[in-house]
Amino acid sequence: MIRTLLLGPLDYVGRHATKFLFGGVLVGLALPPLAALLRPGLVVFLLLPLTMALMRLDWSAFHAYARRPLLVLPMVVFLLLACPLLVFATLEPLGLPRPLMEAIVLMAAAPPITGTVAISLILGLDAALAVIVMVIATALVPFTLPPLALMLLNIEIQMSLAEFMGRLALMVGVAFGGALLVRWRISNETLRANSRLIDGCSVMALVLFAIAIMDGVAAKLMAQPGYVILATVSAFIANLLLQALGYVVGRHIFRLDQPAALTLGILTGNCNMGLVMVSLADRAVFDMVVFFAMGQLPMYMLPGLLQPIYRKLAARPARS
C-alpha cells in the first residue's frame, strides 16, 4: 500500500527530472532560508543519487569495452588529465577572476556525472561507453584531481594534498561501497522491479542538493550580480565547449563513430562538480562555490534543449 502511494509521485518526479532539478535551483535562489536549512545535508544529497546510479547500472555493458582497454583508458586520461590542462592553458591569459578560473579548471578535472548514462540512453547514443568511462573516471578521480589541482595547476584551496585526496576518496568509496553492498544483498530482479521507485528517490535527493547548493548564492546575486551572471554564462560556455572538444577528439583522435563521439562529448562537458565541492567542504572560497552552483544549470537544461541536434548528428554519417 505504502509502495503504491509513493510510486506515483516518485515516478512522476523521475520522468520530469530536469524540470524538477531546474526548479530546485530556482527554489534555492528564491528561498534562502530553505537553502541554508538543507545545506548541512549536501553530502548525503550528493552521495545518495551517486550510490543509487551505481547500484542501478547495467554492469553487463562493461563487457563490450572491457576487451578494448587501449581505447577506454586513453579516454579516461583525456577526461581527467588532458581536459583540465587544456582548460587551464586556455583560461590563464584571459584575465578571469582567479576563483572563477580555478573553479572551471576543477570542473574540467572532475569525472562525468552519472546522469550521462541516462542522457546517452535517451538520445540513442553509446550508453555502454558512457557506463564504463564514467565508472572508471569516478573511481580514479581521487588520485588525479587533487595533485593536478594543488601541484600541477597551483590552485590554492587551503588544504593539503593528502587531505584533499582522502576526502575525495572517501566520497567515491562510500558510493561504490554502498552500491556493491546493495547489489550483494539484493537481487537484480528486485532492483529492476523497483527501478522507478529508486530513480524517483534519486531525483528527489538531487532536487534537495540543487536547493542546498544555492545557500548564499541569492545574497551574492544581490551584492555582486555581475559576478554571478559571469559565473552562469561561463558555466554554459564551458559545458558547450568541452562537449565540442570531446566530440572532436572522439572523432579525429580516437576514431569513434558518430554516436560514440557524441557520447564522449557529453561525458566531457557534464562534470560532477558537486563531488568536488562537497570534498572541498568549507575550504573553497565562496566565489568558486557560486560557479559550482550555477554550473548545475547547463547540465539540467542543455540535454533537453540540444536533443534534436544530438539526434540529427548521431544519425548523420560523419566523414572520417
Image (cartoon, rainbow, N blue to C red):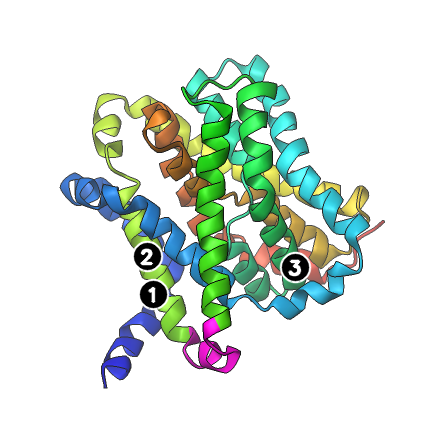
> Looking at the image, is 299 positioned above or below residue 217?
below
Q: CA distance from mark 3 to mark 2?
A: 33 Å
Percent position of residue 275, x then y: 44, 42
Query: Please, what is the dominant secondary structure of the magenta stretch?
Result: helix
Res 205 label: 2
Image point (65%, 59%), residue name: 312
Of residue 203 and residue 41, the one placed in the foreground of this image is: 41
Image point (50%, 28%), residue name: 162
Of residue 170 and residue 91, the one placed in the foreground of this image is: 170
The residue that label 3 is drawn on is 312
Q: Quick check: 78 left or right of 148?
A: right
Res 269 label: none
> Looking at the image, is 53 positioned above or below residue 108?
below
| Circle nearer the N terminus (3, 2) | 2
Percent position of residue 14, x then y: 38, 67
The residue that label 1 is drawn on is 201
Q: Quick check: 85 left or right of 94?
A: right
Res. 56 visible in picture = yes
Q: Is residue 190 magenta?
A: yes
Q: Tag 3's secondary structure?
A: helix
The amino acid marked with disc number 2 is Ala
Q: Residues within 10 Å of mark 2 (few under 14, many from 20)?
A: many
> Looking at the image, is 81 positioned above or below residue 125?
above
Q: CA distance from mark 3 to mark 1?
A: 32 Å
Instruction: Give the magenta range.
Output: 185-195
Q: Is residue 258 magenta?
A: no
The amino acid marked with disc number 3 is Lys
Q: Please, which residue is most extreme toward the right here?
A: 320
